[in-house]
Image: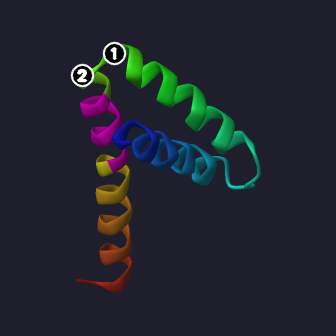
Amino acid sequence: MFGKIIGALVGREIDRRDGRGGTKGAILGMVATGGLRRLGPLGMILGGGYVAKKAYDRRRASRSQRGY
């Protein structure tokens, strides 16, 4: 269950980086889910860390634009 959620979030981040939307992020998210499952708990940590880093960077960028 957590693997699918993390895979979906990784796919969304890949799709955002591309900027066009579509199925590319969904397909890469499914591939990432398979790879993360094979790595076991380490894969979940790596995938979750990737998503957390992207969210942190996005939040920091939005705060710097507002002047906080």
Q: Is 41 on the left or on the right of 35, as rendered?
A: left
Dots 2 and 1: beta carbons under 8 Å? yes
Q: Is 66 on the left or on the right of 29, as rendered?
A: left
Identified by mark 2, the residue type is: Leu
Above or below residue 40? Residue 21 is below
Residue at image position (48%, 42%) is 10
Label 1 neighbourhood size at 10 Å, few (<14), some (14-19), many (20+)?
few
Identified by mark 1, the residue type is: Leu
**Which label sits on residue 42?**
2
Above or below residue 43? Residue 59 is below
Mark 1, secondary structure of its residue = helix
Q: On the image, numbered disc 1 is attached to which residue?
A: 39
When asked about the image quadrant of residue 55, the answer is bottom left
Which region of the structure is painted magenta? 44-51
Q: Quadrant of the N terminus?
A: top left
Label 2 neighbourhood size at 10 Å, few (<14), some (14-19), many (20+)?
few
